[in-house]
Amino acid sequence: MLGGFAGKSSAGGRTRLRVAVAGDKGTGKSSLISAVASETFPDNVPRVLPPTTLPADAFPDYIPITIVDTPSSIDNRIKLIEEFRKADVVILTYACDQPSTLDRLTSYWLPELRRLEIKAPVIVVGCKLDLRDERSPARLEDIMAPIMKEYREIETCIECSALTLIQAPDVFYYASKAVLHPTFPLFDQEKQCLKPRLRRAVQRIFNLCDHDLDGVLNDAELNDFQVNCFGAPLDSNELKVVKKVVEDRQPDGVTKLGLTLPGFLSLFTLFIERGRPETAWAILRKCGYNDSLELNTELLPVPAKQFPDQSIELTNEAMNFLSGIFQLYDLDNDGALQPAEQDDLFQTAPDSPWIEAPYKDAAEKTSDGNSTINGFLSEWALMTLLDPRKSLANLIYIGYGHDPASTFSVTRKRSLDRKKQRTERNVFQCFVFGPKKSGKSALLDSFLGRYSNLNTIFNCLIFLWIYLLLSYSLSCISTPGNFRTATRQQWVNDMQQMSLISRGALRQPSYCGKYQRTELRSF
C-alpha cells in the first residue's frame, strides 16, 4: 500500500537524544543529573558535570540519552548558547525552596530561549522538592498554568528530589517523550481539540483502513488496523470495550456497522488527554508520517535526471487519475472546481498545495475564480516540474495508490530532441524577457484572462507575437500529440533562447497554462 502502513518505529528513526540542562546557580541541576545516572544522591558534585549518557534500556524507547550540564555564569554564555542549539530538548530548573529562581524562568530563561530562537521543546523542573515549605498551599498546576499558556514551548512541568530520587528519573523520561512523542504538533491545549494537520492525517489513515469504502470501520477493519500498527489483534470483548468508550465520549462515533470517522478522531483525542501521545505517534509513524505530519521522504521515490536539460513529468496514468479526481470532486458538474470543492479534495493532505507561491493564481480560472480542468492539470504539471517529490506526496494524500514508478517519466536530453527533430515532452518552458515595468506580469496575467479592457488590444498583439515565436520554436520539433503544457517565466536579460532553455540556468516558473498548437485561442 503506497504511503500506507510502512513507516518508521514509534521513535521516528532517532538513534540518540541530547538534553541540555540549564538554570540558576544552586537550583540543583548537577545533583539531579548525578543522582539519576548513579541512582544515588552524590556527596560531592562539581559545579558543572561532564556530559553524561543514560543507557538505551533506561526508558521504553531504547534510545541512549546524552545529558549536558551547562554553566550558570555569564562568563560561559557562549558555551551555554552552543549547547542550547545542539539540544533536542532543554530542561530548565528552579529550586522549590527558592521562589526567586521560579520567577527567573519568566524574567530571563524562557525569554532568552525565544530570543535565541531555540526551537527545542522545554521541560520545567522544580528541584529540591524535599526542601519545599509544606506550609505553602500553592499547587504546581496553579503556578505553572499561566506560564505554560504564555510559553507554548513548555511541554511538561514536574517537581522532583535528587536526595530521595522522587520523580528524578521521570524528568528525563518526560524529556525524551517531548522529543519522540511531542504533544504540541497534535493537540491545541487552549481549544482542547486536535490540531488541523493531525485531523487531516487521521482522516487519511481512516480512509486507508476503510477497505469497503462504506465510511465505517467494521470489526475486521479495526483489527487489521490494530495488527498493522501494534502487531496484535483485539478479541471481541476488547473491541466492544473500545467502541463503548468511544460511544460514551462521541455519540455519533459508533453505529451498528462500526466506528465512524468522528469516533476514530475521538480515539486520538483520548490518547492525548490520557497522557499517551506515544500511542498516537506510533500509529502516525507506522503510516509513514514524520514529526511535521508529512509523509517521510523515503516513501516518496523520485527518478533521477542524468542531465540538467532533462525534466520530470507526470505519466498518462497519473494524469488520468487526476482527471478522474477532478470529475469526482466536481459535485455540481459545472466543469470547474470551486474553492470549497478543492478544499474537500485536499482534506487528507497537510495543507492545500495551491495556497502559496508559485502555485497560487498560477493557472487559468473561470470568471468566478474556479479552477478549470486545464488549469487544474497545469498546476500539477508545474508542481511536478519544480518539485516532483511534493507532487508525489500530494498525489498519495488524495488517494493515488499506484506504484511510484508509474507516476513520473524523465524526458530525454533536449539536444537529442533537436537531433531527432522530435520530442515526447508534454511540458515546455517559455521565458518572457524585458526591463522592469515593461508589462511582463500584465502580459502573463492576460493569458489567464486577467487583464483590463484598456490593454486588451495591446496584449493581444503581444500575445500573437509570443504565440508565433513559440510556434516557430516548436515547429522545429515534431510532437506525437497536439496538447502540451507551457510554463512561462520572467527574466531580465538579453533575448537569447526563447524556448527549450535549461531550467537550471534561470529562476522558477511563475505561471502555467495549457495551449494547443493548432488553435490560438486555447493558449
Image (cartoon, grey):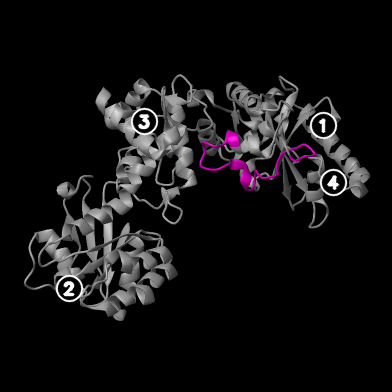
Per the rendering, the mark at residue 472 is 1
Mark 2 or mark 1, earlier in chain: 2
Q: Residues within 10 Å of mark 2 (few under 14, many from 20)?
A: few
The residue at which mark 2 appears reads as: 134
Residue 193's disc is: none
Marks 4 and 3 sit apart, C-alpha to C-alpha, by 49 Å
Q: Which residue is mark 4?
A: 451
Local packing at callout 3 (Cα closer than 10 Å; few below 14, some 14-19, many 20+) is: some
Q: Is residue 346 visible?
A: yes
Residue displayed at 52% across by 38% down: 349
Q: CA distance from mark 2 to mark 1?
A: 88 Å
Whether tag 1 and tag 4 are in contact, CB under 8 A, the answer is no
Q: Residue 265's x, y, as percent?
A: 42, 38
First to last magenta residue range:
344-369
The crowding category of the residue bearing disc 4, from other C-alpha atoms within 10 Å (few below 14, some 14 to 19, many at least 20), is: some
Closer to the eye: label 2 or 3: 2
Q: Between residue 194 and residue 490, name the one nearer to us.
A: 194
First-in-chain label (1 vs 4): 4
**Cβ–Cβ under 8 Å for marks 2 and 3:** no
For residue 162, above or below residue 406? below
State the SS at label 4. Answer: loop
Given the image, on which type of amino acid does mark 1 rest? Tyr
